[in-house]
Image: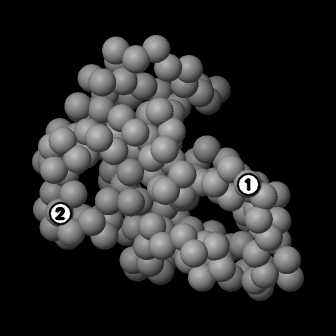
């Protein structure tokens, strides 16, 4: 069945069983290799994408849930103003080690910063708690988040606020 998805700024149609994971459509049909397969059960965060402005695990999100919805991947999100700041902060403090989990982490953090450029530390920790990093780069990731928070504080950004 063809499913229309507003994918990274343009409408696309994917042909997939409606219960098939969104991750498979992204990787195999839309050639979006930045969205990683990790655990396959929504526990590790490597496959996170933005679905209508919320970070979700694409490995356990059925394609039908994305029908006529906006899906943004790391490739698209890092091109935004907030995304560029977050990405550069990760580069500057060398927060990524192997790089497998980082794309999902970046998606979740960019979505968080798009909603609030100055999130509370407890909120940052809750967002990161949904991600596993086996390399142990946690302290550098937190430094990158702090650097991004500082950089975003000096920019005059129009951030979304969920009510």
Q: Which mark is residue 37?
A: none
Q: Quadrant of the N terminus?
A: bottom right
**In the displayed image of the protein, which residue is found farthest to the bottom?**
17
Q: Quadrant of the C terminus?
A: top right
Q: Earlier in the sequence, mark 2 or mark 1?
A: 1
Kindly identify the residue that appears in the image at 76 percent across and 83 percent down: 16
Residue 152 position in % (x across, y down): 36, 24
Give the vertical position of 158 relative to 84 (above or below): above
Q: Which mark is residue 97?
A: 2
Q: Quadrant of residue 153?
A: top left
- Give the structural element (helix, strand or loop) at label 2: loop
**Within 10 angstroms of label 1, few (less than 14), some, or many (20 or more) residues?**
few
- Whether residue 96 is visible: yes
Q: Are marks 2 and 1 in contact (CB under 8 Å)?
A: no
Residue 61 position in % (x across, y down): 63, 69
**Within 10 angstroms of label 2, few (less than 14), some, or many (20 or more) residues?**
some
- Give the structural element (helix, strand or loop) at label 1: strand
Q: Is residue 149 left or right of residue 5?
A: left
Kindly identify the residue that appears in the image at 29 percent across and 41 percent down: 88
- Whether residue 138 is visible: no
Q: Which mark is residue 10?
A: 1
Instruction: Measure the alpha-carbon separation of dots 2 and 1.
Output: 32 Å
Give the vertical position of 53 relative to 157 (above or below): below
Number of marks in the rendered image: 2
Kindly identify the residue that appears in the image at 21 percent across and 69 percent down: 98
Residue 124 position in % (x across, y down): 34, 39
Labels 2, 1: front one: 1
Kindly identify the residue that appears in the image at 45 percent across and 51 percent down: 107
Q: Is residue 30 left or right of residue 6?
A: left
Q: Is residue 134 left or right of residue 67?
A: left
């Amino acid at each position: 069945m063809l499913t229309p998805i507003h994918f990274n700024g343009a409408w696309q149609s994917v042909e997939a069983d409606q219960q098939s994971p969104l991750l498979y459509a992204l990787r195999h049909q839309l050639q979006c290799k930045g969205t990683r397969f990790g655990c396959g059960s929504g526990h590790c965060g490597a496959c996170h994408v933005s679905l209508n402005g919320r970070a979700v695990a694409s490995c356990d999100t059925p394609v039908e849930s994305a029908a006529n919805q906006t899906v943004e991947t790391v490739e698209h999100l890092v091109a935004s103003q907030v995304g560029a700041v977050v990405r550069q902060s990760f580069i500057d403090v060398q927060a990524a080690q192997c790089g497998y989990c980082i794309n999902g982490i970046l998606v979740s953090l960019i979505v968080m910063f798009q909603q609030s450029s100055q999130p509370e530390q407890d909120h940052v920790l809750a967002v990161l708690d949904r991600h596993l990093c086996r390399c142990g780069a946690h302290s550098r990731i937190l430094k990158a988040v702090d650097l991004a928070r500082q950089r975003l504080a000096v920019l005059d950004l129009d951030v979304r606020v969920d009510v």
